[in-house]
Image (cartoon, rainbow, N blue to C red):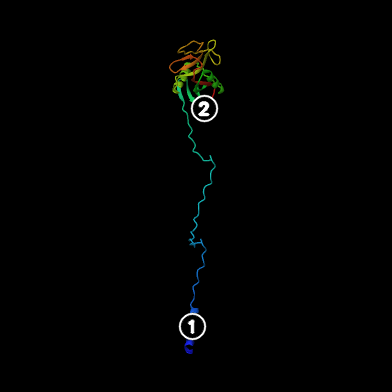
Amino acid sequence: MKTILLLSVLFSVVQSIMAAAVPVEAEPAPVKVGEEKKEVEPVQPEVPVEAEPAPTEAGEEKLAEEPKVVEEEMELSPEGGLQSHPAGWNRYSSGCYLFVTPSRNWDAAVTFCKRLGASLTSIRSPSEYRLLQHWTRSEGYYTSWIGGSYYRGWRWLDGSLFSYQNWYSQLSVTYNPCVYLNTGRGWSNSRCSIARPFICQKRSC
């Protein structure tokens, strides 16, 4: 009986020694709630970035230069040519002319020309008449105011009497004291309150 008990004790001791010799794997560290394990992403090589051009301020964009417009000379009579100048003025012979729209009455046309240092045009020769007649027609109008009016005779705005006359028709001077040019033939008189295009004239431009 004692022998059996001794063997049992000895067997238990041997088992304990063998169990102690087997390595035990370490348990993983506890993970907190909501803290998932993240995989480590491989590091990508850096790509050099080209520098962007410096921004330009508003309105600083360079625009292509517009081509310069060269206006051609128009020969309208053997005595001279109508040469284009800046701002619509045209030189002919010894004066400069400006055809003006929109239409105004005669008094407003006189005031407009004065503000430009000019006068509502006078016509002192057949060639000058043909020039202004052609010009008015080419602008798409049948008539245009000129600087003639009745005051103790038909006079130009500088007070001189008509030395050259090219009347197509005449109405009563009492109600029709202002002169306008016809593109068909000559000139006529009418009420000054009618709106028409007009022609300003000055010595130089």
Classify 10 Å Cα crowding around label 2: few (below 14), some (14-19), many (20 and above): few
Residue 13 at x, y percent in the picture? 50, 83
Residue at the disc numbered 2: 87
Residue 99 image position (x, y, % from top left): 49, 23
As shown in the figure, which amino acid type bears the numbered disc 2? Ala
Residue shown at the point (48%, 23%) measured from the top left: 82
Q: Nearer the viewer, residue 179 or 70?
A: 179
- Determine the residue located farthest toward the left in the rendered image: 184
Q: Who is closer to the viewer here, 67 or 81?
A: 67
* Rendering coords of residue 136 (x, y %): 46, 21
**Residue sitting at x 48%, y 83%:** 12
Judged by depth in the image, the label closer to the viewer, 1 or 2, is: 1
For the residues bearing labels 1 and 2, Cβ distance under 8 angstroms: no
How many numbered marks have been drawn onto this rendered protein structure?
2
In the depicted structure, whether residue 89 falls above or below residue 27: above
Q: Quadrant of the C terminus?
A: top right
Residue toward you, 113 or 24 = 24
Residue, x 48% and y 87% (percent of image)? Answer: 5
Query: Mark 1 — residue?
Result: 12
Image vertical order of residue 17 relative to residue 70, above or below: below
Disc 1 packing (10 Å; few <14; some 14–19; many ≥20): few
Query: Residue 191: x percent and y percent?
Result: 50, 15
Q: Quick check: can you spot residue 75?
A: yes
Answer yes or no: is residue 94 visible.
no
Q: Secondary structure at mark 2?
A: helix
Mark 1 / mark 2, whichever is N-terminal = 1
Q: Secondary structure at mark 1?
A: helix
Tell me the kind of residue under disc 1: Ser
- Of 167 and 7, nearer the camera is 7
